[in-house]
Amino acid sequence: MSELLDQLNEPQREAAACTEGPVMIIAGAGSGKTRTLTYRIAHLMEKGVDPFHILALTFTNKAAAEMKERIIKLVGGEGRNLWMGTFHSIFARVLRAEAAKLGYTSTFTIYDTDDSKAALKQIVKHLNLDPKGYRPSYVLNRISMAKSNLISAKEYQEHPDIYQTDSDAKRPAIGQIYFMYDKHLRHSNAMDFDDLLFIRNILLRDYPDVLLRYQQRFRYIMVDEYQDTNYAQYLIVKKLAVRNQNICVVGDDAQSIYAFRGANIQNIFNFKRDYPEMHLFKLEQNYRSTKNIVNAANCIIDHNRDQIQKALWSDNSDGNRIKLIRAMDEKDEGMRVADSIQNFRLSDNADYRDFAVLYRQNSLSRSIEDAMRKMNIPYKIYQGLSFYGRREVKDVLAYLRLAINPHDDESLVRVINYPARGIGQTTMDRIRVAAADNDVSIWTVLENIHDFGLPIQSGAVQKITEFVYMMKRFESQVATVDAFTLAKQIVYASGILKALREEDDPESAERIENIDELLNSVQEFVEDEEEGPERMEDGAEKGLRTLDEFLQQVLLYTSEDKDKDKEADKVSLMTIHAAKGLEFPYVYVVGMEEQVFPSFLASSRAELEEERRLFYVAVTRAEKQVTLSYAQTRFNNGQRMGGEASRFVEEIDPKFIELPSTKRNRPEPGTLPRAFFNAGKPQPEAAIKKKASTQSFVKRGPTVANSPAEINSIMPGMKVSHEKFGVGKVLGVEGASDSRKAVVFFEGVGQKQLMLKFAKLSVIEE
C-alpha cells in the first residue's frame, strides 16, 4: 500500500486505498472525512490517474478549495487540474461549453435567489394575481422542488395531482407562473441555480454523444455529502458513472437535514441497491469532540429507526457533561446563555469566536441578541447578509452581468436608472409591457426604442439611447480587456461611486469601501495563477482572465464565502442548518422545547427523525462543551405559552448530562424530562440532610470583612459579598485604581460587571 496512506488510521486507509468499483464511505461527525477524501484523490494521482479524469463534487466552494489546496500540497501542481467543485459550479462550466445545443449563449447569466424572486414578483403582477397569496419565496420553492424532481413547466401544468395540491393551497396559478418564469429565463439568456441541474439532465438525456464524452472524461467520480443529494443530482451522477462504475460516495445518514430543499436520504440508503458490488467503509472515530459529547450524540441518534448502523467513538478526554439551562422565559434564557458565555470565556481564557449559539428557527435569536447587547458581548448573525448580497455590491454586479449578457432583464431593471438618469418608472412600465407583448427581452426594446413607437418623452428616449451606447461599449471589451480593468471602468463610468459620495448617509463610506473590496476581489482573480480547470481545459492554457470568467465564479459562491467579518472575535449566532460543517469549542442550543424543537410541523415519523438528525448535528458541532437551554414560558404568536423540555433532551442518558444547579426558578415536577426524575433522584432523608448541611454552611459561613476591600486587593477567584447581590465569585478583573472593574458571578442573580470604587465589595475569608 502507498506510503502516502500511512498517515491515515486503518479505516481511513482502507477506504482511500479502494479506488476501483463502487465505494460508499459512511463518515461519522468529526471522523476525518475530508482528510480521507483528500488522500484518496492524491492516491489515485500517485497511481497514475490523469487529474483531468477525476471529478470530485462537493456542496460548498469552501470545501472544494480546502480539499484542492491539501491535494496540491501532497502531489504538487498537477492537483490544480482536478475537476473539483460544487455540483452547480462544475455543471455551469459544462453547460457553458454546450450552451448552443440548448438554445443559450455561453455567456448566459445565472440568477441568484433575489433575481428569481424579482422576476416572479413581476410575473404575479402581470397576471393580476394576489401578491400575498403568491409570495415569491413560496412560488420559487414550488418551482425549485419541481426542477429538483425533473418536472418541467409543461409537465407541471399537465399533472392533475400537482394542480390539485396547488388548488387546495388556494394557489392554482403556480403552473402558469412556472411556465412564464421559464419563458422569462430563456428570453433573458439566463438560468437559475436549479436549471444548472435540470438542464444538465436534459443535455445528458437528449444528446447521447455528449453523455458518452463526459462518461469517458470522468472515469473516477467522488461525491461528498451524498446524503444531501436530490433526485436531479442523483440521476446525473448515476448516468456519468454507469460506464466505468468507479464511483465513491461519502456521507453520513445521521446528518441528512435538508429534506425541505429536496435532499433525498433514500439516495444513500439505496446505494447498495444501485451498486450491489459496492465496498462499504465506516469511519467511526471522532477526533473533534470529548467522549461525553460523542456518547450523548450516540444516545440521540440511536432513537432513529431508519439509519445505517455505526458506533461513533472518541479517544479524547471525557470532558464536561452536557449542561442544561432551565429558564423562566426567553428573556431569562438569553441572559443565562450570555452569563454562561462570559463565565467560560473568563475561566477558560477563551475568545468570543470560540462560541456558537444555535437555534431551530431564526425568531429565537431575538432574545439572545438582546442579552448579548446588554452584556456587551460582540456577536454576528452567521449567513445573514453576505458580502455579495449587499445592496451596493449587487448594484455593481448587475452592471458587470449586463456587460456580459445585455438580455439579463433583472440586472437591467436594477441599474437602468441607478444612479438616476431620467428613466422613470412609467417609462419602464411601458417598456416592460412592450417586451411582454412582443415576446422579447427588455434589452431588445431598448436597443430598438424608436421602432416600437412607445409614448415616451424625447428626453427619456435620449437617456435610454445613451445607456444602450454605454453598455454596448462595455460589451465590446469583454473578450479583449482583463476583468479588473473593465470592472474598474464600469464602476467609474456608471456613476455609482459619484452618487454614493453625494449621498447624505453615514453608511455611504462603508458602501464605497465594499465596492473597493469587490474590485480588489476582481484584481485578485486576475492575478491568481493557482486555478484548476477554470484556467486550463485539456491542457490548453488560457491567457486573459475575463469578466465573464470572474462572474462565473462569483455567482456560484455559497453563502459562507467572501465574508469580511468571518474572522472577527464575535460569538456566532446561527440556525442549526447553517452550522452544518462547522465546529466550535463551545456550542449552545437554545429553544429546546416541545413544539419548538422538534418543530410542531414534524407530524410523521420521517419528519421527526429528520428533526432528531438536526439535533445530532447541533450537538456534534461542539469540541469541548455543549449547553442546552429551554424556557418554561415563551411568547408564541403574541401569546405567552407554557413550555416543557424537548423529548430530545430526555433521550440523552442522564450520566452524560448535568441538571441545572441554580435554585432560582425551580420548576414544578414534570417540567423536566422524566428520565431526570427517575435517574439518580435522592431519597427524602438524603435530600433533607443535604438541605440542612447547606443551611448550616450559610449560617456558620466564613467570616465577612467588616470594611470594603481595598480596590487593588480584589483578585480573580475570590469570594466576595455585595449589599444588594449577596455572595459571589470574582471571575475577572481589569484596569487599575479608580478605573478598576471586576466581573462577579452572584448565585441566583447572575454575572455583573462592577466598578470597584462604587461596588464596596467585601472579601469573604474562608
Image (cartoon, rainbow, N blue to C red):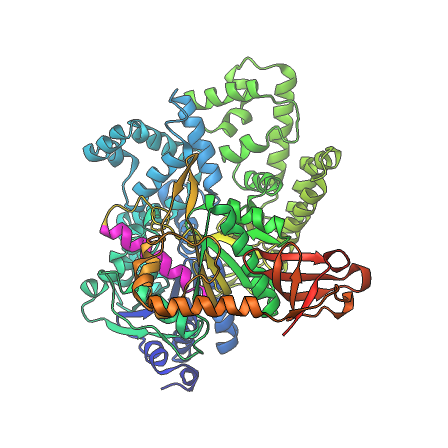
Q: Residue at x 45, y 27 (%)?
A: 122
Q: Residue at x 52, y 75 (%)?
A: 73
Q: Nearer the viewer, residue 669 or 417?
A: 669
Q: Nearer the viewer, residue 704 or 180?
A: 704
Residue 619 inside the magenta-drawn segment: yes
Q: Residue at x 55, y 18 (%)?
A: 426
Residue 563 pos. (x, y %): 58, 53
541 sits left or right of 141 in the view:
right
- Magenta span: predominant SS is helix
Q: Quadrant of residue 721?
A: bottom right
Residue 209 pos. (x, y %): 29, 54
Range of residues picked out in magenta: 605-623
Residue 674 pos. (x, y %): 30, 58
Question: The N terminus lies in which quarter of the figure?
Answer: bottom left
Q: Nearer the viewer, residue 43 or 117?
A: 117
In this view, which residue lies farthest toward the top? 455
Residue 592 inside the magenta-drawn segment: no
Is residue 311 in sight in this rendering? yes
